[in-house]
Image: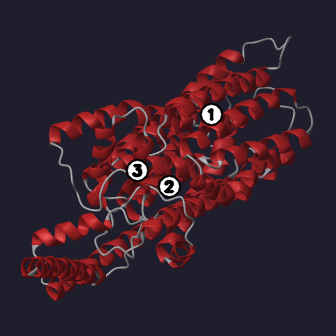
Amino acid sequence: MASLQKRGSLEKRDSDEKTRSQDEKDAYDAEVSVSVADSANDDEALKLVGRERSAQFTEEYNRKLRRKLDCIIPPLCAAVYFTQFLDKTSLNYASIMGFPITGQQYNLVSLAFYLGFLVWEFPTVYISQKLKVAKYLGANIIVWGIVLMCHAAATSFGAFFALRFLLGMCESCVAPILILIISMFYRKDEQATRISWFYVMNGLTQVFGGFVAYGISFDSGRLLAPYKIIYLLLGGLAIIVGICVVLWLPDSPVHARLLTKEERIACLERVRDDQGGTENKRLKKDQVVEALLDVRTWLIALTTVLTSIPNGALSNFSNIIIKSFGYTSKQTLILSTPGGAVASLTTLLCGWYSDRKNERMTPIVFCLIPTIVGSAMLIGLNGSGNKGALLFATYLIGTFGSALSSVYAYNASNTSGHTKKNTINAITLVTFSIGNIIGTEIFQPKDAPAYIPGKTAIMVLLTIQLFVSFFLRWINIRLNRQKKKALEEEKARHGWTDEQMQKERERHAFLDLTDKQNIFFVYTA
């Protein structure tokens, strides 16, 4: 009996020690200086990996995995963006191929796309958070392909306005979802390059679209007007791309069917130290509030407006401007293509530099300066009859397009917390649509063919943006200094070793904390 009592006493003591040990661990966890979310609020990644790193992968394994991802994700993202930008600028080609809407009504039809974009941006982003993002994206692409083909049947201003409005609604989900997918699968020092790989399609579509439109322009139009052929071809292409996205683009590392379970885990472990997380299906009001109160959100919004006003103008009027130099419609279609090549090259170079130097704002400055110079040339040489110089100026202007690619990369690298990411991406795209709406109106019919007020506005707006870029860069550098100081204080207060610090960093990676809540988050300037 005494033996049994002693055994019971030992078991009780062991149990008490385990309880005390657990209590001590819980107390230690509670001392972490940032708020740690409960499991209901955690990142989806925790369905596959632990709070702390439990699996190690060699650099060679990670390189092979990255190559595999590069063969799947960027090509599909590029196909989506290629289709979107081609569809969005289809009106630019149609404008010189017998399109029945002209003058101020043409401006309003152009505006309708961005109006639909503006109205539907926030709803579509928050709907996508509740669903599988890639499947939602694919469905939208298929629908907009159908809408685009319907343009061939439209004959009135009202019909074209309605169709362009619907097209804007369908396409409003594209950029936020692509940015989100890139940030889920790639590390911060890889994101700008991958974003440039799909954003480069903006320039390549200008080349491709120009040659296709040039070929179609030789059609006699007996069966179908040339602009109708454009809409049918582009709509069919969008439907094919949408089906490919539904079938093959992964929704997240957790649900990537094209990867093995080990590869999915490796994907998550690759991005763990970046503290960006992957996704969370719950809409968190505190993250929405934080996004709205973050001054950087509105500086990014201002950046987007300042660079989107020129985009709205030039994406719809660039061919008209080139034609005003004295070229025919067919010559204009061919001569517009080098501008796309310039834009593509600039985008790739800025993306490479951005990751190589860990910069986001400096590449924006690099790409805006040639556009400012080009605008000044168009104003100064107006009426000179110097076609070559004027044409060269329009090619210089094409460099500004890569600014938005850098903004996308900035958002991907400088925001965490799934709801906050979605909110900031939505604000970015809302201001993108506002800027483009304004842009369609700065080239007024009364200013044709020189459009001097519009060209002057472009030059002034982009000059202002140079200063905004430097200010944003300074803010991020300052925030990093503050975080570094706070982290050193936490380390001293808790007496953490370097190993314990790393453990804490790992435990915070997939708690769906915002960049401000997570003391380990580092901003990219």
**To which residue does mark 2 refer?**
372
How far separated are the C-alphas under marks 2 and 1?
25 Å
Left or right: where does residue 207 sit relative to residue 66? right
**Structural crowding at the residue carrying mark 3, measured as other residues with C-alpha within 10 Å and reported as few (<14), some (14–19) or many (≥20):** many
- Amino acid beneath label 1: Leu
- The kind of secondary structure element at disc 1 is helix
- The kind of secondary structure element at disc 2 is helix
Q: Are marks 2 and 1 in contact (CB under 8 Å)?
A: no
- Amino acid beneath label 2: Ile
How far separated are the C-alphas under marks 2 and 3?
35 Å
In the rendered view of the protein, which quadrant contains the C terminus?
A: bottom left
Residue 53's x, y, as percent? 22, 57
How far separated are the C-alphas under marks 1 and 3?
27 Å
Foreground mark, 2 or 1, reads: 1
Q: Is residue 230 above or below residue 313?
A: above
Question: Which residue is at 33% across, 39% downward?
Answer: 261
**Structural crowding at the residue carrying mark 2, measured as other residues with C-alpha within 10 Å and reported as few (<14), some (14–19) or many (≥20):** many
**To which residue does mark 3 refer?**
184
Q: Which mark is residue 86?
A: 1
